[in-house]
Amino acid sequence: MRIRATMAVASGALALSALAVPAAQATGSDGGSGDTRITKVVVDGDNKASVGVSDPRTIKVSVTATDDSGIAGAESFSMTGPGYGFLETGRPTCAASSSTTSTCTASVLVDPKTDYLSNASAGTWYVDAWIDANDGDYIWKEKAGSFNFQRASKLTVNASPEPVAKGKTLTVTGKLSRANWETLTYKGYTNQPVKLQFRKAGTSTYTTVKTVTSNSTGDLKTTTTANSDGYWRFSFAGTTTTPAVSATGDYVDVR
């Protein structure tokens, strides 16, 4: 008989974790060959999940596993991260892609207004998974996959004057900010490299002109030369704790 270690938590809530243990894996069998394997873990499609300051966010976890007898089911997936972060999904639903392989999917709802997120919890998180096979085999794998749990970001831009004479100086300002989960507001993201980009009217591709660093309040300011009609924007590549974001282009008429 198998003995499973479980933890009672409220689904969707972040909780304190008393112990930190090394990554582990256990396989076993109630009569099978003990060959169950986890082959893939995907969180929200791209292993990145960002949460803002007001709207609830559903995070989807998919775990693909294989066994020669096929996959019977899975236990709720748990996710752990920095700042004592802990999340647990509902019970997964498994869909077979072949006689041996299935992808088990579940989700968890995170509400920044009620889950009391800590800014320190942003960063790299890990997924723990338990999968059962049809022949009694099973696998439990700690840190079966990882993803970035991020504080949602915003980026603005304004280019002036508008219109502007060809060859004259254009001043471009903006602000990079990200969710502060503890105050439920957006605050400036400081000392971050942000690209100033231009897209000429009638084209579809932005080209980087220069890189600007956000100041102590997240504000951005730079100058450039106006040569053609087109759109100016700031673009931020993102970090482990904060997702990439690009401002909506500001059109400038050059005369």
Image (tube, rainbow, N blue to C red):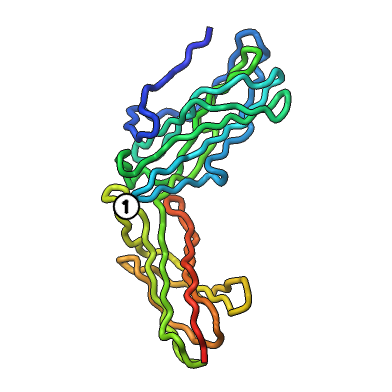
The amino acid on which the numbered mark 1 sits, given as a three-letter code, is Asn
Q: Using the image, determine if residue 219 lies above or below residue 144.
A: below
- Camera-side residue of 134 and 251: 251
Q: Give how far across and how far down residue 12 sits, in percent.
A: 39, 34
- Camera-side residue of 244 and 60: 60
Which residue does the numbered mark 1 point to in the structure image? 180
Numbered disc 1: secondary structure: strand
Q: Quadrant of residue 149?
A: top left
Q: Give how far across and how far down residue 138 sits, in percent.
A: 59, 18
Q: Give how far across and how far down residue 58 sits, in percent.
A: 45, 40
Q: Using the image, determine if residue 151 lies above or below residue 116.
A: below
Q: Give how far across and how far down residue 3 sits, in percent.
A: 48, 12
> Which residue is at a point 39% across and 64% down the rendered structure image?
176
Judged left or right of residue 234, residue 139 is right
> Which residue is at a point 58% across and 79% down the rendered structure image?
200
Crowd tier of the residue under label 1, counting other residues whose Cα lies within 10 Å: few below 14, some 14–19, many 20 or above: many
> Which residue is at a point 47% across and 83% down the rendered structure image?
224
Judged left or right of residue 106, residue 190 is left
- Camera-side residue of 21 and 106: 106
